[in-house]
Image (tube, coloured by chain):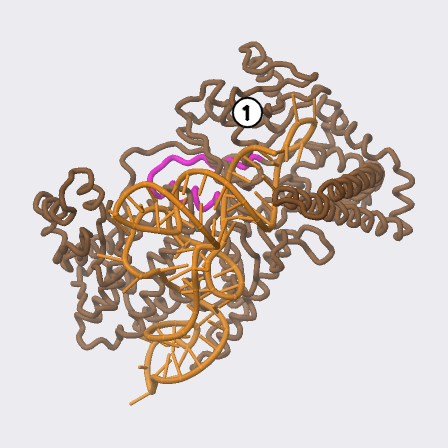
Chain colours: A brown, B orange
Amino acid sequence: MVKPAANADHGDYQANFAMPLGKRLGRPPREVAAEILRQIRMEDLCQQVEIAGPGFINLRVRDDRLIERLGAAAGDERLGIPKVDNPRTYVIDYSAPNVAKPMHVGHIRSTVIGDALCRVLRLLGHRVVSDNHIGDWGTQFGMIIYGYRRFLDEAAYRDSPVEELARLYRLVRQLVDYHNGKAKLPEMQQKLATQESALQQRKVEAGEKPDKKTRKTLRKLENDLESARKQLAEQQAKLAAVDDDPELSKLVAEHAEISSAVLAETAKLHAGDEENLRLWREFLPACEDEINRVYGRLGVTFDHTLGESFYNDRLGPIVDDLLERKIARESDGAICIFFPDRDVPMLIRKQDGAFLYATTDLATIRYRQETFQPDAILYVVDFRQGMHFEHLFAAAGLIGYDDLELRHVSFGTVMGEDGRPFKTREGDTVGLESLLNEAVRRAGQIVAANDDAKPDGAELSEQQRRQVAETVGIGALKYADLSQNRTSDYKFSYDKMLATVGNTATYMQYAYARVRSIFRRGNVDVDALRTSAAAIVLDAPAERALAVELLRLSEALDLTVADYRPNQLTAYLFELANRYSTFFDQCPVLKAETDGLRQSRLLLCDLTARTIKLGLELLGIDVVEQM
RNA sequence: GCCCCGGUAGCUCAGGGGAUAGAGCUCUGGUUUCCUAAACCAGCGGUCACAGGUUCAAAUCCUGUCCGGGGUACCA
């Protein structure tokens, strides 16, 4: 109804509803606007109210009300952010890595976005249950078990179990991929040949002058053919790489049946085989240590980590229950849930009796419903799983979870700077930790360069520099992700995320450090300042602009939560930091003309610092006192 | 084939019925005896893919077309 003015000339806020209202009432919009203003009497809140153009209502907030609100925020831990009237219970499902594999770039978005949403919802007064639905029960453990039995380096395992297990996983994975790839090769070649002849035939049929529709079909066939060729070439290159490696090719030959053997190990585990279960229990803590180390560094925590294995016992019963209630039925030997308005069913038990992730997800909804009684469950998962969630939510509807908001908070793919999915030059996925290390390394260079260039000489010790670099590097990585609309794909670029200018964590952290620097230099007692009830003065345009923005934090948080988009919060923080920079440039603080003005400006500085700190904290990003 | 998402400045992206479409980067110019110049200020840069439609008003909603990405029952 009322939103920030698009243009500063129009005041602080504007309301546009007089125009559609006028249309509906059949009265001139300007007249309606005047009537609205007569009725709601804005004089208490606004110093200037005007009707502009066809019927825009432009509002300028009274300075005394701004000052009053700033004073209240200064004395409040929460900076004046109200709690919601009707708190809800949210279960937020995010991160969810496969624990046997190292975390990679694909886990950043889910982890970082989910964590930020938890923090914001909590601050607003909601009850939030964060749950890391890890993959701890899948084929990857069959691979590790297989590798453990045949390729274990005992000394390495004693020394560093996590690394050794990761090595085993990668090795077995490589062998499995080789055999599967080799097996698929004839099929791929066959398909390619079919496509080629189909294209030729269509070309002949089309004749000299194909119509538009035919041209389109031909182009599509050509594209498909091209990508099939590419896929085949890639596959062949991968196989050749193994063949050319004498050690690997030897292993490949020795383990011809590895694919089925791995599946057998997995099946034994799921069936409760004692030895495999023992190994699984032995491996799991090491795997969890590994991901927890990354979470520790990212500053991400979970209330619960209930992975796939937790739901193992609940899968059979839920399928039986759905069969009994006629929600699911058998089809081609599999158990499916069919939907009236969709042609594709959701499978919940395979022909061979194994369960699928749809099964686990249904069991998970039931468990969460029984345990937490949530009002909403948010799944922070990438957009490619959209159809899975449509199915899952539709199934939940059939089962009867009517008062439960189920929401796929989807996000796009992380791309490399070439615009293709982010990979190393060799085509491997990039480990999350190496990303963190590289971001921190580059941050270290920036921090050192800045510190060296300070007019009065460097201020930071080596240790401080390292800490600052860690905070700046990881903050940059997170912020780059959060500042983009989650639904779009995003290009991963160290240079962009660590830029000292523009909408980055670094810029925000710098703005914060500059404020803190003022307080250090002026020997200001912050606690005394906050309780001093010093009057805030908003005479300079830069002061007033900053003040208005400071009071918009709560608005920004509401926007963030409305569609679960953290970029609403980063946009706010960037605007705030900008206005602060302008203020900092134009309004001397420590050397203000009068003591009263100095106190007033110190309060504005303090509020800015606290707002930036809180805002970044809600995004899971730390600040530093000096940089 | 069908379904979902996208196409906005040279680049990276916001905005998703409301006033003259914004920001950052890049480029050009300016600002420092003064609290962190990692700053600030100003300027250059647009057929919001295309064509229709709805509306007082469309980048935004609807339909169609083109281009790109993703998905499409026994992986997750």
Magenta highlight on residue A125: yes
Residue A95's place in the image compared with A518, above or below, is above
The residue located at (20%, 41%) in the rendering is A23
Q: Residue furthest left?
A: A38
Given residues A531 and A544, the one toward you in this image is A544
Instruction: Give the tally of numbered discs.
Output: 1
State which region is magenta.
A114-133
Residue A399 highlighted magenta (yes or no)? no
Q: Is residue A391 visible?
A: yes
* Chain under callout 1: A
Tell me: B18 left or right of A310: left
Q: Position of residue A272 (x, y in %)?
A: 72, 22
Please name whichever residue, A446 or A500, is drawn nearer the observer in this view of the structure: A500
Rendered residue at 72%/21% (across/down): A271
The answer to whether residue A590 is left or right of residue A288 is left
Q: Residue furthest top?
A: A324
**Which residue is disc 1 drawn over?**
A342
In percent of width and height, residue A404 lies at: 42, 26
Disc 1 residue type (three-letter): Arg
Q: Quadrant of the C terminus of chain A?
A: bottom left
Instruction: Provide the secondary structure element on which disc 1 rests.
Output: loop
The answer, for residue A78, to whether it is visible in the render is no
Q: Is the N terminus of chain A in the top left, top right, bottom left or bottom right quadrant?
A: top left
Q: Position of residue A390 (x, y in %)?
A: 52, 30
Front residue of A256 and A192: A192
Answer above or below: position of A399 versus A130.
above
Residue A426 is drawn in which quadrant? bottom right
Please state if A282 lies on the left or on the right of A246 as rendered.
left
Residue A323, quarter of the rendered image: top right
**Left or right relative to B13: residue A150:** right
**Whole-percent x, y for residue A554 in the image:** 30, 48
